[in-house]
Structure formats: structure tokens, C-alpha cells
Amino acid sequence: MTPKDSAATPVAKQNSSTVDVPFIEVYGAREHNLKNISLKIPRNQLVVFTGISGSGKSSLAFDTIYAEGQRRYMETFSAYARSFLGGLERPNVDKIEGLSPVISIEQKTTSRNPRSTVGTITEIYDFLRLLYARTAEAFSYVTGEKMIKQSDDQIVQHVLEHFSGKKTIVLAPVVKGRKGHYRELFEQIRKMGFLRARIDGELVELTPKMQVDRYKIHDIEIVIDKLVPSVEDRYRLSTSIQNALQHGKGTVLVLDADTNATQFYSRHLMDPATGIAYDDPAPNTFSFNSPYGACPVCNGLGEIEELTEDSIAPDKSLSISRGGIAPLGEYRDIWIFSQITALLKRHKTSLTVPISEIPAQAWHDLLYGFEEEDPKGKREPFIFEGVMSFLKKQLESDSENVRAWVQEYTTQSTCPECNGYRLKKESLHFKLDDKHIGSWPKWTLPNWPPGWPTWKSD
């Protein structure tokens, strides 16, 4: 390990303890399995210790050189400071010269978490999340307009300016774009003392055991007050607005009774045109490892596994009887093949016809399902679930073996909800310089955004 030409070795400019010493010199190292080893290590160069397991690499690097450097550093502390740190034993070595203060970097094995990236492992992404949580501007994912946030006084003032002298209804949104019968909700609203609600744009009186169609999407708002806003009656308006914000979880809807024009207001980030509101951003809003930020479709992976026609029938020159539908394999005397036979017979084709020659409608019905009623009503209707529908159900099976069987025929594709950015749509509409946080991992130096800071290495 000693250079042939010591004159060519750079001489370190050190403090008084290591002035003009070109080597780290170790004499008589006997720590662990080292057998009285002496050597010189050139300074200011990258030196690598190699050897078979048990040859003493770690004993020399960590238990001897690093341990002695750490011990000498600790000795520079006062006796009072050392009393809190504890003492370090001197390694089993005769002498070490030319030793500088030392740093030992622990070896770390990265995880195989599919959500991990270079940014998350190096913690750079943590700083990005904090940056966006504190400085990014929010935009509506529906209209693209900038979201706004208003105080209670600002809301009252805006209503006075735009609804003064008009018949106005103050509403508290409690359901927005969700299905359900909401029988319990209506009963709860009645018990709070409210008599009316606005359901899907229509003002109705609340009655006992009231409910709506559970299979339709509904918008429900509580009627908080009916009034004509004026400066003289500001106190009543302010009280009604605060009451609506309380029941509407920070959002209020003001309705012009004559024109049915509406205006949303919110204490939170909100789109005034649609009433869509975002929670105040926090670092976990931009984390695909957190349920608060991860895309709900791909669970923060950016990709989804899906069954496609090509994945379950890769070779369409084969017939179904010869294994053209890969998950089913070749023909066997089982129920699924008898059902397929009956379905194809209705389309005047058979199992022995190559898939490429099966009529398009027959192939569609085979994959996605078919139902046929007996026109005379004498027989039970023929219902075929569809191969694709059947296989998708098996992906949610309780049996791990069944799920593994179906997953063999899935393909990975970019998540259609987040486009591979792995974050929910609200998180992707917080932007800095018109760039959302998901754009950062896809940037490289050649396409670094124009106008953003750049640097060059010396």
C-alpha cells in the first residue's frame, strides 16, 4: 500500500499535530484478528481495503484507525464534557501517526419499497414537500382558476356588496356529489332545529323519515336563514354566515332567491365558481407514502395492474379450445367451457374457431358478459358473466393462490388518475411557477425549466 515514488505523493498541510506528514502510519495493529500489522496509507487519496471475509478489513479501518481518531478527538474535550460522553478505550495498536479527525459513514442497504425513489431515500423530496406546503399556490382541478381563502369578515363584506337588497338564502353544504338515502342526516338536521333544506337545487321542507334515492348523486344544503342583506342588519348576516360555516365545515353557499344564482365562500382554499374546497396544505399532502397525498387509484405507485384483451388472449390465431384464452387453458369438461359454448352457439360460432375469426360482438359478449331473456318467458334467462369480469373479481379473492394465478395475466400501465405522478389530483394542483411537485422527479438537467436557477461544476 506504500507508493513507489513518495515524492509524487501530495503532502498534507495539517495543523501542528500532523504537519507535512504524507502518510497515515500504523505500527503493530493487533485489534481482533490483526496479527501485528504495520503499514503506511497515503493521505489525500482514495484508499480501498479489499480481502476475503475475516481478513481484518473492518478491524483495521473501524476498530483501529477510526477508533483511535475518535479517541483523540474526545481527549480535546474538557474533563467536565468527557464525564457526560464516557471514555473510549485505546485500540490495541503500538502507534498511529499522521492521523486527522475522522468520520465513519455507516453502510446502509436501501429498501425495496416500490414507493421509494432517489428523492425519498436521500430526503431531498422531504424539502420539496415542505417548500410546496409553505409557498405553492392552489388551483382548481375543474376550472383551473386560482383557489381563494376568505375570513368570516371578508365573506360578510362580499355578500353585502353583491347581494345587498336582494332576497337571499344562506345555505350550509353538508353533502356534495355523493350517493345515499341520507335518512339519518335529515333526522339529525331536524333535531338541530332546521326546518328546510335544499336538495339537488330544490328547496324542500324536512319531514319525519324523509329520504332520497340512494342510487343517485345528491347535493344537500341546510337552509340556515332567509334574509335581505343590508348594512343595518349586518349582525344577523354575520351570525347566519358563521352558523353556516360551522355546519358546512368551513364552506357556505349564498343563493339569490329570485335568480337562483349561487356563490360559494370558504374559510379554506376554495374555487368560487364550483365550490370545490381543498384542505390547507401540509407536507404529507405531497407525499405518495401517505394516505393524505397518495393517489387513491394506484395507492401511490403510479402504475396499476390491469387485465386487457391482449394479456388474456395474446395469440389470437389459437382457438378457445386450444388455449386461446390463456387463464382458462385448453378445453376441459368444466362449467366455464360449457357456458362459453352456449354463448358462442347463440352467435353461430364455436370453440374451435380461431379467436381472430370470432365475430366482434360475440367476442365482446364473451369478455364482458351477456344476458338473454326468453321472449316467451318459459325458460330462465341465459346470463353469462364474462371472462374479463370473472377474472377481475378473482383479483379481490381472499385466496392468495387465486390472486397470484390471475396476476400472471395482468399488465402494468400508467395510472389513468394521476398519470404516473402518484399523487391525488388535489396535490397536483398546488403549483410553483406553474409546475406541480410531481414534475420534479421527471426533470433532468437538459430540460430544466427555463428561468430556474442552474449551476455548473468546477
Image (tube, rainbow, N blue to C red):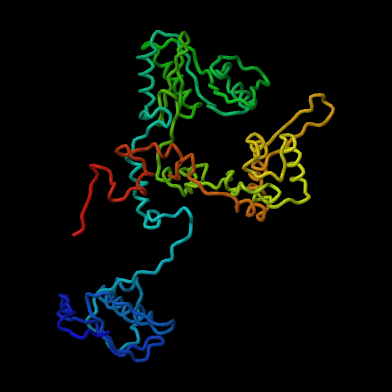
Picture coordinates of residue 158 (x, y %)? 36, 18
Return the x and y of residue 26 as percentages of the image width and height: 28, 86
Residue found at x 66% / y 20%: 210
Res 154 quadrant in image: top left
Image coordinates of residue 374 in percent, x first then y, are 79, 27
Image quadrant in which the N terminus is located: bottom left
Q: Quarter of the image holding residue 230?
A: top left
Is 148 above or below relative to 354? above
Farthest right residue in view: 378
Using residue 338 as the reference point, say whether residue 126 is left or right of it: left
Q: Nearer the viewer, residue 109 or 418?
A: 418
Q: Is residue 142 visible?
A: yes
Asked if 320 appears above or below 45 in the picture, the reply is above
Q: Is residue 366 left or right of residue 84?
A: right
Residue found 33% across the figure and 45% down from its top? 131
**Residue 375, x across and y down, in percent:** 79, 24
Residue at 24 percent of width and 44 percent of height = 452
Total labels: the figure holds: 0
* Image quarter hosting the C terminus: bottom left
Up-down relation of residue 212 to residue 92 (above or below)? above
Q: Is residue 219 above or below residue 2?
A: above
Is residue 94 shown to the viewer in this render? no
Task: Tell me the residue at 37%/91% (across/down).
Answer: 35
